[in-house]
Amino acid sequence: MTSSKKPFGLYIHVPFCSSKCPYCDFYSERKKDNIPLYLNAVKEELAFLNRSKSFVSPEIYNREVSSVYFGGGTPSVLRASDIKGILGTVKEKFILSKNAEVTLECNPSLKNKEEFFEGLKNAGVNRVSLGLQSAVLSERKALGRLGSAEDAAQAVYAAKKAGIEDISLDIMLGIPEQTQDSLKFSLDFALNLPVSHLSVYILKLEEGTVFFSRKDKLDLPDDDAVSDMYLFTCEHLKKKGMRHYEISNFCFDNFAGKHNLNYWKCGEYLGIGPSAHSFINGKRFYFERDISAFICGAPPIFDCDGGSSEERLMLALRTDEGISIPEKSERLSEIIKEFQNFGLLNVSNDRVILTDKGFLVSNYIISEILSEI
């Protein structure tokens, strides 16, 4: 049961989408008949933790919530009043930090943008994440994205007008038909908007998606081209004043995502909703990918123990803070020196920090370091 007094993050999964993108592996349903039942189930679980009681004790209500993240799916299929209702339960039952980050993922093509974002601001949302993916029309069509890049721009300005200052855009690398020039166009399109954060993800073909079934027919850049695009992105965004604080994330000023940084620091978080994952009191657990099961009260499933020193190292090396290794064996020192010579990592005051090139092969570097610890 929960014993830590540290702040934790709260994740709420919204499993609804108007359409399913062919590359997406996140759990969602197109049918929206269950939205009222889903909303009631989420608020019920937040209020009583009946589903999670084998992993979480009521003591968690005495701890601060440092961040709330509505992910999906497409959370913006809900009304702003629905979000306000959920956050009302959070504020009633939990201790929400005064400076808590409250994020909602949004589809930029949503209607009544100004009214919606005003409603979100009134509900307590202070950060939005918008899925641009690409500003190039042909690439957007290849990704199955609805609407245009201009929709994303209008959404950014509407959120800003509503008083939401922290705005993030998602951009994808290695997508069909993409070149470095078209990537630069998308990056500059985003940089010309009043955004504080960019998440830049390399396309991964996930089993069970439409893209995976068509992988041999997709016009995808090869691995070398994608690596070049990633390194170009890192350099280009840094020149524009952005901090590359995690493998796929960049920010201006102090706008690093608190919720996701909590993941990389191996902090605790409670996930509510079908497919939502949690890490509480050293245990990792998750709800099955089934909205009906969640509504009917199915408990989460144990995944594994978490929080080991190896896991903390693996997660920390995804960030620009790296990890401290004050005592190193002779062999580990040799491995680190070799990676340093290849420009894959830097060492500063015993902290090992991966470079942009190192991020590209982070799994290999991490496995080599772990083998000697």
Image: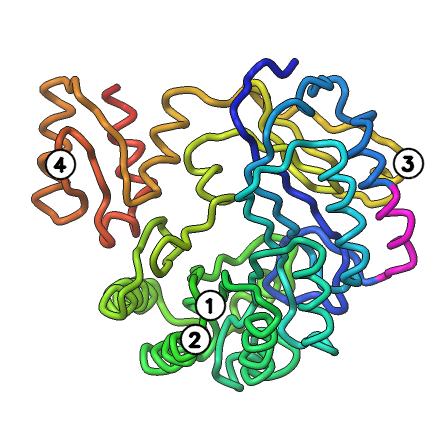
Q: Earlier in the sequence, mark 1 or mark 4?
A: 1
Q: Which residue has dot 1 on it? A: 171
The numbered dot on residue 11 is none
**What distance separates the C-alpha of mark 3 from that of mark 2?**
42 Å
**Disc 2 secondary structure class:** helix
Query: Measuring 62% from the left and 62% from the top, which residue is drawn there?
Result: 213
Q: Residues within 10 Å of mark 2 (few under 14, many from 20)?
A: many
Question: Considering only vertical position in the picture, is 341 above or below 32?
Answer: above
Looking at the rendered structure, the kind of residue marked 3 is Cys
Looking at the rendered structure, the kind of residue marked 4 is Ser
Q: Quadrant of residue 178?
A: bottom left
Q: Main secondary structure of the magenta part?
A: helix
Looking at the rendered structure, the kind of residue marked 2 is Ala
**Disc 1 secondary structure class:** strand
User: Can you give x and y, in whole percent of width and height, for residue 155 in the image?
Assistant: 60, 75
Nearer to us in this view, 366 or 242: 242
Confirm whether the magenta stretch covers residue 33.
yes
Which of the two discs, 4 and 3, sits closer to the camera?
A: 4
Q: Residues within 10 Å of mark 1 (few under 14, many from 20)?
A: many
The numbered dot on residue 190 is 2
Which of the two discs, 1 and 2, sits closer to the camera?
A: 2
Q: Earlier in the sequence, mark 3 or mark 1?
A: 1
Question: Considering only vertical position in the picture, is 174 above or below 40?
Answer: below
| Contact, mark 1 vs mark 2 (Cβ under 8 Å) | yes
